């Protein structure tokens, strides 16, 4: 279980560039919950994940994982609980190491400082079996350098490695946003499957509102460092992309500033149109 209690973070406090990124965020995520997160640009979505992973230490408030206080722990100290896939496919794996070496390191996540890359034969077979699940033919390329893979392949591999040794919490920050629609769809399907199979407790930031509604059992919307509202499973099922869009439009009316970037808006319109008979 993850508990985020009144977490606040201001960047460049006291300067002209002061930015309140998190303005008192509280969220309790139960084991097995799959929370999707939407929100305007700069709403604080990534910062929230960053405080959970330990990339950013909050100014105040507290974070607990399974009852243990982890607020001030750094990323590497949380590695055995928390796993993460980034938006950038280049980030989750090491290009100069082989697929097998990357997997060997990932499978030791949080356990040891040593970079033991020796892989036994049964282990190799296990890696092949895991890779086969990605349906990308990577099981036959264990010795290939990861730098040779496409963005979609690397992202699928990152996802696989992030779910190794069943992390307590899986954080996904727009992890399909940099992929073309077809690859994004594949990685989304893999995500659904892996989360369901391992019953992973997951927080997924996405700008894809159709996805935010369809995946997971809870949806939260953030704006200006706050969680504006939450939808439970039933409310999610009863909501449409148009409903979510109108929430963004309301915010825009209040602030007078665009709450979504053009790419998000265009994609949302495209998805809405495709869904029409
Ligand atoms: N490391 C940082 N240093 C300074 N300012 C930051 C940093 N990270 C985030 N911010 C600022 O904090 C605010 C929240 O940013 P954050 O990246 O969390 O938003 P987001 O909801 O993820 O937005 P996006 O949809 O653009 O990814 C923004 O104003 C951003 O400029
Ligand atoms: Mg972000």
Image: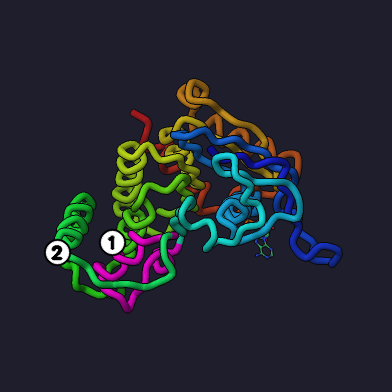
Q: What colouring method underlies this structural image? A: rainbow
Quadrant in which ligand 1 is drawn: bottom right
**Residue found at the very far bottom of the displayed protein:** 96
Q: Which residue is mark 1?
A: 153
Nearer to us in this view, 159 or 231: 159
Residue 44: assigned label: none
Question: Who's the residue at 51% across and 49% down the image?
Answer: 264
Q: Is residue 53 above or below residue 154?
A: above
Q: Secondary structure at mark 2?
A: helix
Asked whether residue 224 is in view, the answer is no
Foreground: disc 1 or disc 2: 2
Percent position of residue 61, x then y: 73, 46
Q: Residue at x 54, y 60 (%)?
A: 77
* Frontmost residue, 106 versus 50: 106
Q: Report the quarter where the C terminus lies.
A: top left
Q: Is residue 37 visible?
A: yes
Q: Closer to the camera, 211 or 193? A: 193
Judged left or right of residue 30, residue 4 is: right
Whether disc 1's CB lies below 8 Å from ligand 2 is answered no
Q: Nearer the viewer, residue 240 or 160?
A: 160
* Residue 90 forms part of the magenta stretch: yes
Mark 1 lies on a secondary structure that is helix
Residue 59 at x, y = what percent?
Answer: 75, 55
Residue with the mark numbered 2 = 121
Ligand 2 within 8 Å of the CB at mark 2: no
- Decide: few, some or many residues near mark 2? Use Cα within 10 Å; few <14, some 14-19, many ≥20: few
Magenta stretch bounds: 88-110
User: In the rendered view, would you say 166 is above or below 96?
Assistant: above
* Disc 1 to disc 2, C-alpha distance: 24 Å
> What residue sits 81% from the left and 62% below the top?
13
């Amino acid at each position: 279980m993850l508990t985020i209690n009144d977490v606040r973070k201001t960047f460049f406090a006291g300067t002209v560039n002061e930015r309140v990124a998190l303005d008192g965020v509280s969220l309790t995520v139960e084991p097995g919950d799959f929370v999707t997160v939407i929100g305007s640009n700069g709403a604080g979505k990534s910062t929230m994940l960053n405080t959970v992973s330990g990339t950013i230490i909050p100014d105040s408030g507290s974070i607990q994982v399974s009852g243990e206080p982890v607020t001030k722990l750094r990323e590497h100290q949380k590695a055995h609980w928390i796993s993460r896939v980034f938006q950038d496919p280049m980030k989750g794996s090491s290009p100069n190491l082989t697929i097998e070496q990357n997997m060997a390191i990932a499978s030791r996540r949080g356990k040891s400082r040593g970079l033991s890359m020796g892989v036994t034969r049964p282990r190799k077979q296990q890696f092949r079996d895991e890779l086969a699940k990605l349906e990308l033919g990577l099981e036959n390329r264990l010795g290939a350098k990861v730098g040779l893979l496409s963005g979609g392949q690397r992202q699928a591999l990152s996802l696989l490695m992030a779910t190794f040794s069943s992390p307590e919490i899986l954080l996904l920050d727009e992890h399909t946003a940099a992929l073309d629609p077809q690859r994004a769809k594949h990685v989304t399907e893999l995500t659904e499957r892996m989360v369901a199979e391992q019953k992973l407790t997951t927080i997924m930031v996405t700008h894809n509102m159709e996805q935010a509604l369809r995946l997971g059992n809870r949806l939260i919307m953030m704006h200006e460092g706050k969680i504006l509202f939450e939808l439970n499973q039933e409310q999610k099922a009863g909501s449409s992309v148009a409903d979510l869009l109108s929430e963004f439009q309301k915010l825009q009316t209040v602030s007078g500033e665009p709450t979504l970037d053009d790419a998000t808006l265009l994609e949302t319109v495209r998805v809405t149109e495709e869904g029409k008979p």
